[in-house]
Amino acid sequence: MSNVLVSSVQQVLKELYAQDLSESQIQLQKTRKDFDGDVTLVVFPLLRVSKVSPEQTGQQIGEALVNAVDYVESFNVVKGFLNLSFTAGYWVSRLAEIAQTDNYGQRPKGGHSRNVMVEYSSPNTNKPLHLGHIRNNLLGYSVSEILKANGHEVKKVQVINDRGIHICKSMLAWQKYGENETPQSSGLKGDKLVGKYYVEFDKRYKAEIAALIASGKTEEEAKAEAPIIIEAREMLQKWEAEDPEVRELWAKMNGWVYNGFDTTYKRLGVDFDKLYYESNTYLIGKELVESGVEEGVFQKREDGSIWCDLTEDGMDQKLLLRSDGTAVYMTQDLGTAKLRYEDWPALNQLIYTVGNEQDYHFKVLFLLLGKLGFEWASNCYHLSYGMVDLPSGKMKSREGTVVDADDLMDEMFETAKAQSAEKGKLDGLTEEEADSLFEMLGMGALKYFMLKVDPKKRMLFNPAESIDMQGNTGPFIQYTHARIKSVLRKVENTVKEVPAVTGINVNERTLIQLLNQYPEIIQLAGEEYSPAVIANYVYELAKEYNTFYHECPILIEADENVKQLRLVISQMTANVIASGMKLLGVQVPDRM
RNA sequence: GGCUAUGUAGCUCAACUGGAUAGAGCACCUCACUACGGAUGAGGAGGUUCGGGGUUCGAAUCCCUGCAUGGUCACCA
């Protein structure tokens, strides 16, 4: 609609001032709430062509638009702002179109569609998932869904960091001190069990360092010479040499971890189309690095290590392969990227959902891919997000302040349960139904809380406040949806026909305007890779509906046409709420 | 120290990318259920948008500068 109006404005300007102006010079925006109107034209940029005062310019354009555009009913000018009001008929017909559109808000596939691979989660296999992973998972999943809604072809993937020194640490500690403990024997979730031995390794390592320092070594020497770390390094080399015993242990312990992760992913509601394992890609990376040496873009040093000199690009020397020939993080990332493009040659964009602590890493990665001659290097994008802090500061595993993902989800469930019990609205639900509702509400609260914040900003997670369910929260929106459903349940046939009404009130108008915005919101969220855009919009919609609900009778409305209009508005609001929340990975209940 | 991000009400976050009197929620103070769900709504109070310059019709937004906070500069991942 604004596009149509833009060209009308251009037309009018041409007639008035004999000037052709580009679209970008026509600034249309939603009229602010405290002013009268639907759409506002900013006239300041037009003064150069009108050569009269802002007020006069607004007046002239306003008069011309009322004459030229049939749905522009009236206007007013405040300072340099021309506020335009549309006819009720215009908005009613907009509502009718919305009601008749399948998958309203979503953009069908077409010429603009891209093939996009979104990587997210990608944990290490040496410890369980925590709060930081939750933000990552929710963000990656939601952005994927948003891109799909924009008509793109999306594949969700992760690369599992299943090899490296970290997993060797867990393996070694388990081998030495584990006494064959298994998830079955201990009753521990697999990822938790492996994490336990990672912590055990760290403890022993610390003790050895302390002992060496006491015997006169420097801290640096102690860290390098502690027997247990040397053993771990040896194990990594054995692993790379495919030592059968080490590989067997490795496969067993990783298997435990994957089982544990699967449980967590399932509960979080995230999924993947394909999994990559670094154990399968680091060799490709090594080959790439070697070929880079041959091509002269990388350099081999005397000790055998391989580097890339990035000083001309304003960065440092970057290690790509250790002197003992083992791979580093960067090595395998190069290999993984190459493999992905081989798997999906039509790929247009590769998105990495990874925290901003790795901004530098990805800058370097993309640069290296370019140096290796991959023209698609410029299509790689680092979806960087801020860390999650606790009121006590950073999460630190050593200080035991890590918020475990499974524990947190349990807590959310319990809170939702307690809240519902307090409201006393559980009548008629079986225990099973009630539990699934609590899960929906608890997860809704958690997901909405984490996604409503702009991804690139660091966020504070206050356990006490985050589980709040009043105000700007997931359950508030879920409640609004349930309430609408409750109204709709009471009418026999849901009518999608928009009746002929002579006028609409301010609440109806505002809601239709908001509903009308939904497609633009999805587009904006896609362009910015920001679920927060969706979250804030859905909140505003729910809030506005609640105001409408208080002001306007629906079922008891005497005028049958007005009643139908309100029912359609209600129906569409519920649809858009459900649709928007789905993009965030949040389900909405019909009753709660 | 270099590079990089962030700084908005007591707290947690918005602000359509340069537009009007900077908006919400929480907390605090009022008020509203014999109409459809009170996990709600209406109102009040709360601001030098970190400080200082600049650009212009107009700045939270852009530029410069200072301050604060986080991240990062590993033969860790």
Image (tube, helix red, strand yellow):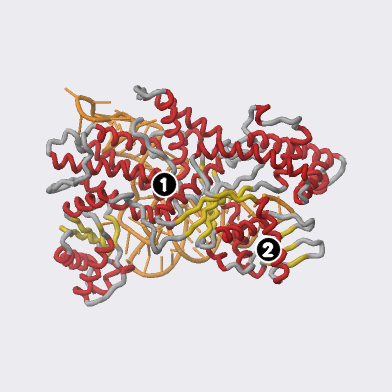
Which residue has dot 1 on it?
A583
Q: Quadrant of the N terminus of chain A?
A: bottom left
Which residue has dot 2 on it?
A288
Q: Position of residue B69 (x, y in %)?
A: 57, 48
Q: Position of residue A4 (x, y in %)?
A: 25, 63
Q: Name the amino acid type tagged 1.
A: Leu
Q: Quadrant of residue A202?
A: top right
Q: Is residue A217 visible?
A: yes
Q: Quadrant of the C terminus of chain A?
A: top left
Chain at tag 2: A
Q: Position of residue B58 (x, y in %)?
A: 35, 63
SS at circle 2: helix
The span from disc 1 to disc 2 (Cα, nearest Å) is: 38 Å
Q: Name the amino acid type tagged 2.
A: Leu
Q: Is residue A419 visible?
A: no
Residue at 19%, 46% (x, y): give it.
Answer: A497
Q: Quadrant of residue A524?
A: bottom left
Residue at 62%, 32% (x, y): give it.
Answer: A189
